[in-house]
Image (spheres, helix red, strand yellow):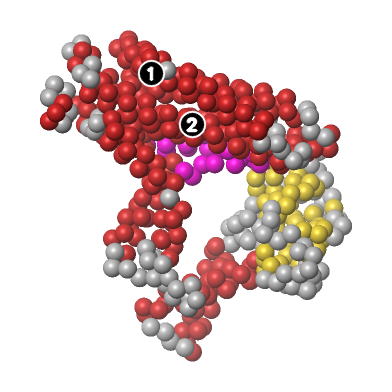
Amino acid sequence: MQRLLAIVWLTWKAALRFKLFLVIAVLLLAAVVGLPLLIKDDGTASGFTQIILTYTLSAVTGLLGISTLWLSCGTLARDIEECQIQVVATKPIARWQIWLGKWLGIVLLNAVLLALAGACIFGLLQWRATKLPPDEQAKLRSEVLVARGSAKEASMDADINTETEQILQNRLKTSPVEKADLPEVRKQIRERVKADFQLVPPTYQRVWQIDLGFAKNYLAGKPLQLRVKFNTAQKNASGTFLAMWQVGLPEKTKFWQSEPMSLSPDTFHEFSIPPDLFDANGLLTITVANPNNTALLFSLDEGMEVLYPESGFPLNFARGLGIIFCWMALLAAVGLCAASFLSFPVATFFALSLMLVVMCSGTLAESVDSGSVAAGDEETGTAGHSFADAFLIPAFKGVLVVVELAKNFSPIDSLSSGRSITWTELGTAFAQIVLLLGGVFAVAGIIFFNRRELAMAQGTQ
């Protein structure tokens, strides 16, 4: 441990010598304080949250990510290129300890900078919140500055698959299809069946039964929020559609019925409902009536969601910073791994290229979904085809699996929408991002560093 701490101290000294700590601290302060001053919110809780939380945390994450890659590539690659690492390597210290000590030094530096930025954001958030109108302050405290859990309807995939197979088998009896076309036919049937589960035709109702689980034990007397979103095939002059809501079951639970609500399609809407509308088993029954002349489509994934208070905002905010910290630890491992076998410019280019791949994961996902890297014909609906699809699509699938291990967390979105970031989510992020992905890069980096010739002439590298 003493040897590791010595390397940590040398890494900190290098960061201070390069003025990196001071530069990043100033940039973070400018992002945290400057953005809210330059970009004015609209006086609403959502606009306030967008400026204070979303923009500032995104800026902090970006600045720390770039500085982490630069420092992790530079601190090892420059020590090797400037022949300073030889002085350390001749000491009674293993190369893996040098590598791990530099990683710990960068990680601890990020921890300090992230803690300072987080404290400034939290303080600014609390201070600026007092300047909102009273009704918006109440909305902010109940919908944003809180950690809300989420409950959705149980998955209907099994029912959809069963009905799909029944329809497919009945069709095959009357209209046989080629074996090669069978997957596409099944896919089309499944989409139609799924649409039936999501549609609320005119003058009809749709019922959700959502199990609150263990949360029912501490939600007595606490209001809940419904988060809804629907789509329509047709538009109207007003741009909105009516929906009437009923929550609870008459004669079995408390019952609440709303006035007709005018809601916009393709938009998330949140509204509060009274407390204690669920039954003794924690089952909440929600009914929507469609009085419009067109059908409403509530997606199975995001059409209906129940939000309930779970914990306080300060601890939730700290857990969100913890996930960002995991990202920084991974970037430090990536940079050091690249610097273990590449020169500083090439290592930086390699690390930034990996970041570019992560940022382009949406494009990769679109190619995987379409089954081809070639663009299709939008007019005819014909899918694109390329000779490279045979090896590029499987490669893209593998890349997406790895990328999702680190990217499948959204602490900034959760904080800005008042969603709870659980300890389980934080633990999963640490296991997947730091231990799994970071561990792979750490093992590779240590192996490369152990095999690298440190005393060779620089001109032959």
Q: Which mark is residue 18?
A: 1
Q: Is residue 368 visible?
A: yes
Q: Is residue 187 left or right of residue 153?
A: left
Q: Is residue 99 left or right of residue 366?
A: left
Quadrant location of residue 87? top left
Range of the magenta residues? 407-436
- Residue beneath the point at 73% across and 28% down: 128
Specify the amino acid type for callout 2.
Leu
Specify the amino acid type for callout 1.
Phe
Q: Is residue 208 left or right of residue 272?
A: left
Query: Residue 224: x percent and y percent?
Result: 76, 44
Q: Nearer the viewer, mark 2 or mark 1?
A: 1
- Residue beneath the point at 31% across and 39% down: 350
For label 2, the residue is 63
- Residue beneath the point at 29% across and 33% down: 345
State how far apart marks 2 and 1 are (Cα): 16 Å
Residue 385 vertical placement versus 427 (above, below): below
Q: Is residue 92 visible?
A: no
Query: Residue 161: x percent and y percent?
Result: 52, 68
Placement of the N terminus among the 4 image quadrants: top left
Q: Are marks 2 and 1 in contact (CB under 8 Å)?
A: no
